[in-house]
Image (tube, grey):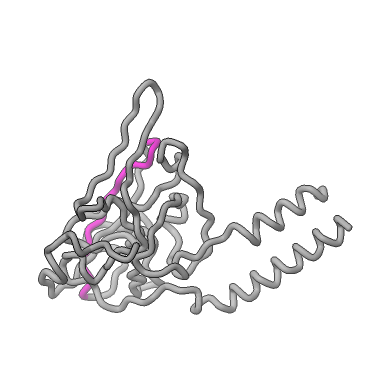
Amino acid sequence: MSLKLLCSAAFLYCGSATILGDMDNGAKFDKCIAIEDWEGKTLSDDITLQDRDENGCCPAGTVPGVKHYNNYVGAQVACGFKEDGTIATSTSTSNGVTTCTYNQCYIWKQDLACEDGRQLLNGCCAAATDCTTNTCGFKEGCMNYAYTFDDVDGTDVSYCLTYNKDYQMENTADKTDDQSDDKLQTDKVYVYTPCSGGGSGDSSRTSGAKMLGGVVCSLMLVLAAFLQA
């Protein structure tokens, strides 16, 4: 491997990973998530984010999150929040140029315990091929709907809505209190009773893996610096 490639690999590996679980619940989110991470990673996993283009769109193969579905808790990145609390997203193409309006996206941590592992970023507990309504790897008492939406290229992307078997409407019906202090106030959004058994999704559960990753990063950067000297 050339010196240039080694240095690039070191800085890319050590500087690009993000753990959404380490962000605050309700934090604003303006990046793009690879579909394979959206459908296969949890809040505690390392993922690499991408920027939106100059027309506000996430590149093909990535998503900004998914449009919030009124009255339901859904994926762990929810989009479409306008200043007045209403929900809308849009994508249009004119003269070959595609423009996207996602409005505001937010981190919405649930981190539910599944029958096997933890809830995925898309809100589901199983891969798209194994996930249907009320058969998606959630624990007993947690009900779900399984849906899809399209990325900018028309690729099907999966996500889930969830609610507690014993449900009622929770929080406040007033949409104007859903957003304040630069965050989504998830305890204000009017939804059916969420499923129980959630967590914060921070990286403390994977601290050993993070420590190992830090050692690898350090070694790669020291080696790159040594070869540059």
- The residue located at (81%, 63%) in the rendering is 223
* Residue located 22% across and 58% down the image: 145
The picture places residue 213, in percent across and down from the top left corner, at 64, 69
- Residue 105 appears in which quarter of the rendering? bottom left
Residue placed farthest to the top in the image? 95
Quarter assignment of residue 146: bottom left
Residue 148 locus on image (x, y percent): 29, 48
Is residue 69 inside the magenta stretch? no
Q: Is residue 151 on the magenta stretch?
A: yes
Residue 22: tell me if it is visible: yes
Q: Decide whether the magenta segment is chiefly helix, strand or loop.
A: strand
Q: Is residue 223 rendered to the left or right of residue 45?
A: right
> What residue range appears in magenta?
141-153
User: Where does residue 227 sit, x and y in percent of width and height?
Assistant: 86, 57
Relative horizontal placement of residue 108, taking residue 165 as reference (left or right): right
Residue situated furthest right in the rendering:
229
Residue 225 falls left or right of residue 197: right
